[in-house]
Amino acid sequence: MRRLYTTLGELSADQLGMILPHEHVFVDLRTPDQPGYAEASVDDVLALMVPQIEAIKALGVTALVECSTGGVGRRADLDLAVSKATNFPIVVPTGNYREPWIPAWVEEASEEALYEWMLAELQSGMEKTGVKAGWIKLSAGDDGMTLLEERILRAATRASMVTDALIGSHTIRGRVVMDQLEVIESEGGSASRFLSIHTQAEPDFALHKAVVERGAWIEYDNVGAVPVEQSAQLIMDALEAGLGDKLLISHDRGWFDPALPKGGIPKPYTVVSTELLPMLKSAGVSEDTIVSLTHRNPFVAFSRP
């Protein structure tokens, strides 16, 4: 049986409903060598982010996928604190972001060491929390992978093959996604366990289709950052093209930013529920399709045995 690995334990599909597959509770977009990187008070994080979680709980959202990974301030302990305070499950990744957001120890580590680190976080737990990573998050440069980014991807593929964990990558260009899939398959991995994050940033819709035809997932995750009508139209185009079974939708919103006083002002995770889904329904998208996009697809993508 497949389960979602969360801050509140392993959850089956029948324990969950709507899942937001790309959000942030805590993120630091400064590079890891900056003073104060990823530092914050637990009380400050709770004060800012608990109301954001309570708002989506009231709308029927049952889980959220944290997309802050190594290099951009992943703090599994803070995710856990917010989760416990709200009794709300959060799926946290292992892995690391792209250059220059790669800490020195990752840059110096061998592929074998990176593989063992990711595997341990997936199987045993992250940091000192005891919470198992639910998936693997990484990234690639806009113009292509560096040698270091490829090393991280190869290690991630090996860890994914052992655990069946999803690999999601912040990759802006579809042609770079195709290069990543070549690397994964050269290692013996499967495109079906890869997610192209920020697919909407690729202007060539033919590449959206090509990624799905290859077997991978695509994600439109800028809902609320652009006019909702624009997101709805792109989703309608994807459904018309037969991409619905491999499509995820989310906001890429939040979050507590330790570079700002008291974490800054978060952007709510509510636009999908309050604006996008009603617009899709008004355009004739069926309830079954809505459930697939918001319940089934994220569970199938992020769950593992």
Image (cartoon, rainbow, N blue to C red):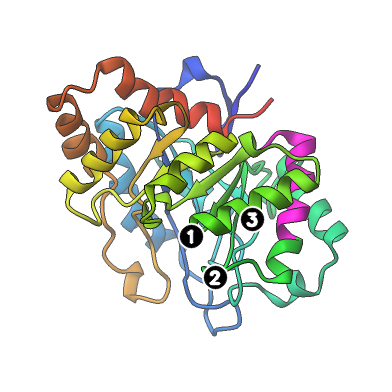
Query: Which residue is identified by label 1?
Result: 173
Task: Give the side of residue 144 with respect to residue 172, left or right.
Answer: right
Query: Which residue is identified by label 2?
Result: 143
- Decide if residue 5 is in sight here: yes
Q: Is residue 158 above or below residue 32?
A: above
Which kind of residue does numbered mark 1 sit on?
Arg
* Magenta stretch secondary structure, dominant: helix
Specify the segment rendered in magenta.
Answer: 152-165
Which kind of residue does numbered mark 3 sit on?
Asp
Asked if the residue at tag 3 contacts the one at tag 1, i.e. Cβ–Cβ closer than 8 Å, the answer is: no
**Which of the two labelled residues, at mark 2 and mark 3, occupies the earlier sequence position?**
2
Task: Give the side of residue 37 with respect to residue 201, left or right.
Answer: right
Distance, label 1 to label 2, CA atoms, is 7 Å
- Decide if residue 87 is in sight here: no
Q: Secondary structure at mark 3?
A: helix
User: In the image, residue 30 lies at what x, y percent?
Assistant: 49, 77
Task: Give the side of residue 101 with respect to residue 222, left or right.
Answer: right
